[in-house]
Image: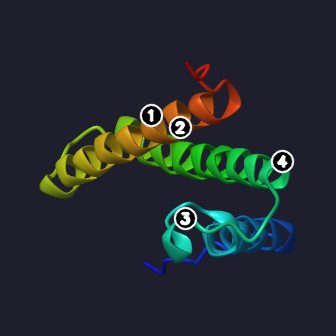
């Protein structure tokens, strides 16, 4: 029996490359952890950049969790690899929640006293 590789469409590869590029470039341009909190972007643009970054992270990690769960629920017999995959999916879901929390904090900051 021969297993055929699945070839993703070019538009999906381009979208994935754009998302990964944005996730890699955003912290280098204006994230708080870079250069001891010095921003390279103005404050308004920095907020938009941070919201875009966390939105893309939620979408990307949420997609990964959905793929893991879809594969897990399609199986009739569960193996050890499936249990490890479920644990990884649970941890990724925690990262989705953390990015959603940060996204909410960026979008609706607490009033200063």
Of the image marks 3 and 1, the number of the one nearer the N terminus: 3
In the picture, the disc for residue 97 is 1
Q: Which sits earlier in the primary sequence, circle 4 or circle 2? A: 4
Percent across and percent down for residue 75 are: 33, 42
If you read the primary sequence from the N terminus, does the residue marked by circle 3 or circle 4 appear first?
Answer: 3
Mark 1 or mark 4, earlier in chain: 4
Tell me where residue 106 appears, x and y as whole percent. 64, 36
Residue at 70 percent of width and 72 percent of height: 29
Nearer the observer, disc 1 or disc 2? 2
Quadrant where the C terminus sits is top right
Q: Which residue is mark 2?
A: 102
- Give the CA separation, mark 1 to mark 2: 9 Å
- Which callout, 3 or 1, points to the residue nearer the camera? 3
Give yes or no for contact between labels 3 and 2 (Cβ–Cβ under 8 Å): no
Q: Give the label, 3 or 2, closer to the camera.
A: 3
Residue beneath disc 4: 44
Q: Residue 37 lies in what quarter of the image?
A: bottom right
Could you tell which of marks 1 and 2 lies nearer the N-terminus? 1
- Nearest the eye: 84 or 48: 48
CA separation in Å, label 4 and label 2: 17 Å
| Vertical relation: 82 (above or below) 16 | above
Q: Nearer the viewer, mark 4 or mark 2?
A: 4
Give the residue displayed 79% in from the left and 65% down from the top: 41
Which residue matches tag 3? 37
**How crowded is the residue under tag 1: few (<14 C-alpha within 10 Å), some, or many (20+)?**
some
Which quarter of the picture shows residue 90? top left
How packed mark 2 is, by other alpha carbons closer than 10 Å (few <14, some 14-19, many 20 or more), is some
Quarter of the view holding residue 8: bottom right
- Numbered disc 2: secondary structure: helix
Q: CA distance from mark 3 to mark 2?
A: 17 Å
Is residue 18 left or right of 102 when viewed as pictured? right
Q: Which of pointers 3 and 2 lies earlier in the amino acid sequence?
A: 3
């Amino acid at each position: 029996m021969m297993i055929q590789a699945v070839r993703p469409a070019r538009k999906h590869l381009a979208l994935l490359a754009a998302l990964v590029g944005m996730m890699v470039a955003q912290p280098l341009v204006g994230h708080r952890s870079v250069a001891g909190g010095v921003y390279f972007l103005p404050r308004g643009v920095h907020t938009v950049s941070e919201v875009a970054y966390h939105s893309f992270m939620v979408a990307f990690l949420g997609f990964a969790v959905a793929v893991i769960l879809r594969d897990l629920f399609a199986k009739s017999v569960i193996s050890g690899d499936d249990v490890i995959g479920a644990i990884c999916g649970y941890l990724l879901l925690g990262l989705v929640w953390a990015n959603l929390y940060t996204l909410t904090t960026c979008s609706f900051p607490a009033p200063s006293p």
